[in-house]
Image: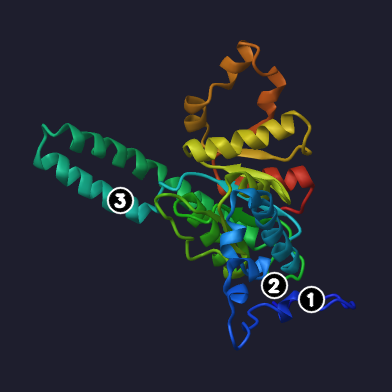
Amino acid sequence: MTEIVAPGPLPAARGDAGADAPAAPRPQTTAPSYRLAFEDVEFLLRQDLRPVRLQLELMKPELLQQEHGIRSTIAVFGSARIPDPARAAKALAEAEAAAHADPRDAVAARRLAVARRTAANSRYYEEARRFAEIVGSTCVGEQVCDFVIKTGGGPGIMEAANRGAADAGGKSIGLNIVLPEEQGPNPYVTAELCFRFHYFAIRKMHFLTRARALVVFPGGFGTLDELFEAATLIQTGKIDPIPILMFGREYWERVINLDAMAGEGMIAPEDKNLFTFVETAEEAWSCIADFYRLPRPR
């Protein structure tokens, strides 16, 4: 996308970027201090420049989303460990073979138990994919887009949601992050809307910026972190209420005991109403359509 440069009397920095050093280098021109500040990576990575890096991570995705006409989004959270059903079935078959080969192997028995649960949970991959396909079909080929799918850009549920949007021919956003065990973006994120973060805090801000709904599938620490940050912001009035749709009542009621929190006085009884349990893609989209009084798909 072509950069729009505002007219003015001052020269653009782009013209000086990559400017050649003088033909006859001198100690002064080869010293790190002589580099243009915005081209000096070592300088930008200094501890004192953290506020600048935070601002850059905030501004880059924001400006690019503006340029691509992203007006509102639906954030989809969920485990990176939930594969599509075919991969889950293959992993289960391998775990069963290993456990049968040595019935006394406790590690193999545990892996089999986890593989069985993963195979059962793989249905959520398909629900995430179908949900995103429904949503993605609402804004295809438009200059200004609402309800654009936004995920963490990784595997599992994130991949499923980006994949569903791609199936519908729609845009989708991926907010990838640098981790010790590197995970690249999944191949279904719209390339021009695939962002990479260093700071978790800025990444989470971008999840909620423009969000008109949160759709939360079973997940672990990362999913819980994203879920409760959003719930806290709504509970405290920092952001306007939006639907928080929880896929899989049976999973979430085992993992989070909201009744116990309310009974202990840690949350108000009405705080439980921040969450709505759903089981299918169609049910989730109906909740969003009802909240915003949108026409139902035929």
Q: Residue at x 26, y 46 (%)?
A: 92
Badge 3 marks a residue whose secondary structure is helix
Q: Residue at x 61, y 61 (%)?
A: 172
Residues at discs 2 and 1 in contact (Cβ within 8 Å):
no
Amino acid carrying label 1: it is Ile
Q: Which residue is mark 2?
A: 141
Q: Which residue is mark 1?
A: 4
Mark seen at residue 89 = 3
Q: Residue at x 52, y 42 (%)?
A: 217
Amino acid carrying label 3: it is Ala
Badge 2 marks a residue whose secondary structure is loop
Looking at marks 2 and 3 on the same chain, the residue that comes earlier in the sequence is marked by 3
Looking at marks 3 and 1 on the same chain, the residue that comes earlier in the sequence is marked by 1
Outermost residue toward the top? 264
Discs 2/1, front: 1
Q: Above or below — where is 159 with respect to 260?
A: below
Q: Front-most of 108 and 204?
A: 204
